[in-house]
Image: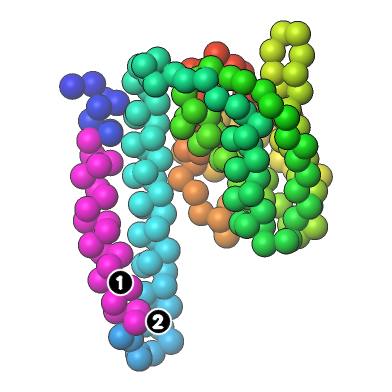
Amino acid sequence: MCIRDRVGNVSHELRTPLTVVRGYLETLQDLSKGTALQVKAYAEMSDQVTRMQSLADDLITLSQLEEDLESLTESFDIGSLLTSIVGEAEALSNGQHVIVFNGQTTMAMANQKAIRGALGNIIFNAVKHNPNGAKINIRIIDEAEGTTISVADDGIGIDPMEIPRLTERFYRGDGSRNSQTGGSGLGLAIVKHAITQAGGTLTIN
């Protein structure tokens, strides 16, 4: 058994105990009439369980992407896929950001589930890591050499020194951007793997 398989198996095994712990924590939170310190402790434990569940899910996703997914390749419309993702991003933003998307029919041949996850990760990051009022512009650009999907925002930006490391596993970047949003540090590693596997490239500016 290779390391990748072991990581995937361990992550699967973590799901059940984490679900049990979360269930008991939620029950204790509902029943608790304790001190402010006890209430705070339950809330912080719940947050950490959520982060551990997110990490386990991301490790499973990355393990699955590293397998041969050619059999799952299918034809689909990127425009329709992005329309659905943008709708979810608008719900996540709750009117706090300006999200602009002009969809168009553009057919692709890839693993639709993996591409949906990759594009969703990028667009949801633009919502979660930017302040209220930021504009997020999503475009499909068809050119002779292929299709480019651009996700740009006018938010807080990223230190150029960090950009080369953003797709490294477990790299979470500037703590000031991540302290309130959690995350496993695997999101962009998964994005890069999914896009590369589909024959594309991920460029971050």
Quadrant of the image occupied by residue 158 = top right
Secondary structure under tag 1 reads helix
Report the disc number at residue 104: none
Q: What is the spatial separation of the Cα atoms under label 2 and label 1, in whole angstroms?
A: 11 Å
Which mark, by number, is residue 25? 1
Residue type at numbered disc 2: Val
Q: Position of residue 87 (x, y in %)?
A: 64, 49
Quadrant including the C terminus: top right
Q: Which residue: 21% across, 44% down? A: 13
Q: Amino acid at mark 1?
A: Leu
Residue 26 located left or right of residue 87:
left
Residue 177 visible somewhere in the drawing: no
180 sits to left or right of 8: right
Could you tell me residue 112's position as x and y percent? 49, 28
Figure disc tally: 2
Q: Position of residue 86 (x, y in %)?
A: 65, 45
- Which of the two discs, 2 and 1, sits closer to the camera? 1
Q: Judging from the image, what secondary structure is the residue with disc 2 in?
A: helix
Identify which residue is drawn at 65% across, 40% down: 83
Question: Which residue is at the front of the view, 128 or 81?
Answer: 81
Left of 67 or right of it: where is 141? right
Which one is nearer the viewer's eye here, 20 or 2? 20
* Magenta stretch encompasses residue 89: no
- Measured from the top left, where is residue 198 in percent x and y? 52, 18
Does label 2 or label 1 sit earlier along the sequence?
Answer: 1
Q: Which residues are magenta?
A: 9-30
What residue is disc 2 on? 39
Color theme of the render: rainbow
Dot 1 crowding, Cα within 10 Å, few <14, some 14–19, many 20+: some
Residue at 60% in and 43% down: 84
* Most frequent secondary structure within the magenta stretch: helix
Crowd rating for badge 2 (residues with CA inside 10 Å; few <14, some 14–19, many 20+):
some
